[in-house]
Amino acid sequence: MIRAMVVDDDALVRLGLTDLLDSDDAIEDVAQATDGLHAIEQASAHRIDVALVDVRMPRMDGIAATKRLRALPHPPKVITLTTFDLDEYVYDALAAGADGFLLKDTDPAEILRAVHLVAAGSAMLHPTAARRLIDRYHHANRPQATRAQNRIAPLTPRERDVLALLAQGDTNADIAKTLGVQESTVKSHVSRILTTLGVTNRVQAALLARDAGLTP
């Protein structure tokens, strides 16, 4: 059972997301929060596997909340929700440790799929908006690109292959099929990639890959 929390200052959005999560027998909605500070309190009181966190909220926004949530002793995975696909705050949320980014008008089935994927250790980014956002704020910075290239330099050729596919949003199963290896082998590669790059999740690894020019 995936234990989820909805964090949004809009009561109607909270209600809608809660009803959606409750429609999935494998997801249990165990907490709701009205802002970032409330989310920290709830995550400290309950074991949360996945938190769906709005970006713009009073008292503490979703970016600060993501940093705080990821720093907890038992940190939940975080999916950032936003209304605007080019919102500059979304990249900051991903860099803060969010494992996914979805628009609030994403198809309900895709939101449920995102919760399952993120709970399983994968990432879920909106297929067009997230890439445009990353390109806009991240990709063309040459000094940053050089630093990223230096950070991925220790990776083996196969690990670079895995990282490139990971940066495209492929799951471990997708990567295993593409490379013709076992999924357990991919998991081992991903674990070493995260350790070598000094990042905490797949999204941050994907950002580095894009900075380094590993993906278009």
Image (tube, rainbow, N blue to C red):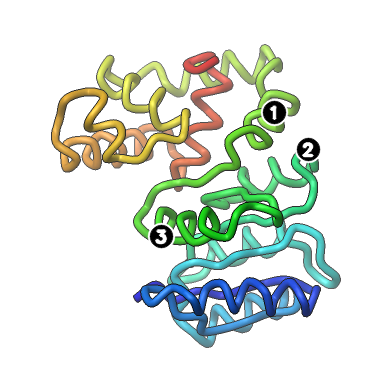
Q: Which quadrant would residue 119 be assigned to in this image?
A: bottom left
| Label 2 to label 3: alpha-carbon separation | 25 Å
Count neighbours of disc 1 (C-alpha within 10 A) and say few if under 14, some if 14 to 19, many if 20 or more. Answer: some
Q: Is residue 197 left or right of residue 78?
A: left
Q: What's the amino acid at mark 3?
A: His
Q: Is residue 62 left or right of residue 5?
A: right
Q: Residue at x 58, y 21 (%)?
A: 211
Q: What's the amino acid at mark 1?
A: Arg
Expressed as whole percent of the image width and height from the top left, the position of residue 172 reads 30, 40
Q: Which residue is mark 3?
A: 116
| Label 3 to label 1: alpha-carbon separation | 24 Å
Q: What's the amino acid at mark 2?
A: Leu
Name above or below for residue 114 compared with residue 196: below
Count neighbours of disc 3 (C-alpha within 10 A) and say few if under 14, some if 14 to 19, many if 20 or more. Answer: some
Mark 1 in CB contact with mark 2 (< 8 angstroms): yes
Expressed as whole percent of the image width and height from the top left, the position of residue 147 reads 56, 19
Name above or below for residue 50 compared with residue 134: below
Q: Residue at x 29, y 31 (%)?
A: 175
Q: Is residue 34 left or right of residue 100?
A: right
Q: Which residue is mark 1?
A: 132
Q: Which quadrant would residue 131 be assigned to in this image?
A: top right
Expressed as whole percent of the image width and height from the top left, the position of residue 194 reads 38, 39
Of the two numbered discs 1 and 2 on the same chain, state the one appearing first in sequence: 2
Name above or below for residue 198 compared with residue 119: above
Q: Which residue is mark 2?
A: 86
- Secondary structure, mark 1, is helix
